[in-house]
Every structure is written in structure tokens, then in C-alpha cells.
Image (cartoon, rainbow, N blue to C red):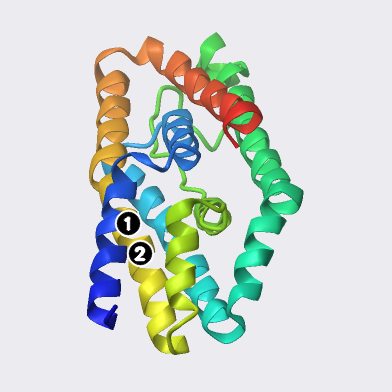
Amino acid sequence: MSTSMIFSSILFMGLTCSLGCSSVSTPFILGSLLGEGYDVQTSRKAMLLFSLGKVISLSFLGLLSAIFGSIVLTYVEQAYPNTTMWIVRIATLLLGIAILYSALKKDACGSGCGSCPSSKKCGSKSAPNIRKKSYLFAGALYATIPCAPLVTTLTYASTMTPILAMALAGLFGVVNSIIPILFYASMVGLANTEFTRDAPKFVKYIKITGGIILIYAAIFQV
């Protein structure tokens, strides 16, 4: 198979993966974006950071595959059940707990403006700060979870030069992120914006739902 055919096949496979094969990372993305209450723009930024982490991680795996060949595939398949799985589970669980705590703790403005911190006006709304390092690190971790498309990509990468191998794995990560960035981030961000504007009293329950999704994903999906 020629290099161009390999790239075409991997890119098409990556695009189809972005439609439905990311069953492990999708609950994390939906849960975290809901729990953080991000709007459309901020959700897209978070999703871009998550995807950037994936691309960096996959490019590095592609490089290692080109240099060390099947040794990398064996390591990836063995490391997941022993190490990566627990790192991903713990990180997802902690984020879910943090979001639940944030949603359930008593709002200082709830008992009157006199109890508001001096640095925050009662009733004022500010855009939530994005957890840049968290999303970047999460994307890098989730990219290492073995699946058939990843193993196929690294198998082809092991037959290429380091530069081509990095390009192949990195582009796989890029096309694998197209649907989540365009659809998931926009959908969740729009929902958060609509609830904040039209039904603010339900925002807390939306965030609680996001935290529960994360905890469920940590226990049952990873």
C-alpha cells in the first residue's frame, strides 16, 4: 500500500471515529463542559485544548512507533490496564467530585449582598475560567487508551520514517477531533448559555448532572 493510500485510509478512519467510537472520552467531554458551565466560545476553547493534547500525544506515539516498531504497540496495550486506566479514572473522578462540590456548596450571594466577598459584586456574572492544563493533560491521556484504530495507525506508523509517522498519527488526532469540536462543544455551550439566560435556577442542576456523568464515566466507562 502506498503512503498516500495509507494516509487516506487513516484519515477516513479517524473521521469516522470522531462520529461515534470515542465512547470513553465523550462522557468526559460532555460531563466536564456541562459541569463547568462554559458558553459556546469557551467550550470550543476547552475542546481545542483537549484535542491539542490528543494530537501531541499521538504524534509522540507515532514517532516512538517509527523508532522502536512493535515494542511501542506492546507497551501501549500493556500499560493501559495497569497504569493509564487508573490515572484516567482517578483524574476523571476527582474532576467530577470537584464539580459536584462547586455546584452544591452554598453561594455566598444567596443570603444577601452583605455576605458577598469584597472582590465580587452580588449577582455579578463572570465567565468561568477555563482549566487549560487540565484539558490539555486529559486529551494527552485519553489519546493513549488503546483501541483498534489507534493500533492500526501505530502499526502503519512503525513502517514509516519518523517525520511521516508523526504526521500520520497527528493527522489522525486532528480528524478524530473534528466532530467533537464542531458539534459537542457547540451543543453543550449553547445549552449552557440558554439555561443561564432563560432558566438560571436550573444551572446548578445542569452542573450537578455534569459531575455525575464524570463520576459515572470514571467508574464504568474507563
Q: Residue furthest front?
A: 1
**Which residue type does callout 2 highlight?**
Phe
Viewer-proximal residue, 136 or 86? Answer: 86
Instruction: Say if mark 1 contacts mark 2, CB within 8 Å.
Output: yes
Residue 172 is labelled as 2
Crowding near pointer 2: few (<14 within 10 Å), some, many (20+)? many
The quadrant where residue 160 appears: bottom left
Checking the image for residue 175, the label placed there is none
Residue in view at x 53 percent, y 75 percent: 60
Query: Label 1 is placed on what type of residue?
Result: Gly
State the SS at label 1.
helix
- Can see residue 53? no
Which quarter of the rendering shows the C terminus? Answer: top right
Q: Is residue 46 visible?
A: yes
Q: Residues within 10 Å of mark 1 (few under 14, many from 20)?
A: many
Along the line of sight, which residue is nearer the eye, 48 or 88?
Answer: 88
Residue 114 percent across, percent down from the top left: 56, 18
- Whether 142 is drawn above or below 104: the answer is below
Q: Nearer the viewer, residue 129 or 216?
A: 216
Q: Is residue 107 left or right of residue 191?
A: right
The residue depicted at 58 percent of the width and 55 percent of the height is 141
Q: Which of the 4 quarters of the picture holds residue 127?
A: top left
Secondary-structure class at tag 2: helix
Residue 190: percent from left, percent from top: 25, 31
- Residue 14 has which mark? 1
Q: x and y percent of residue 81 in the render?
A: 71, 47
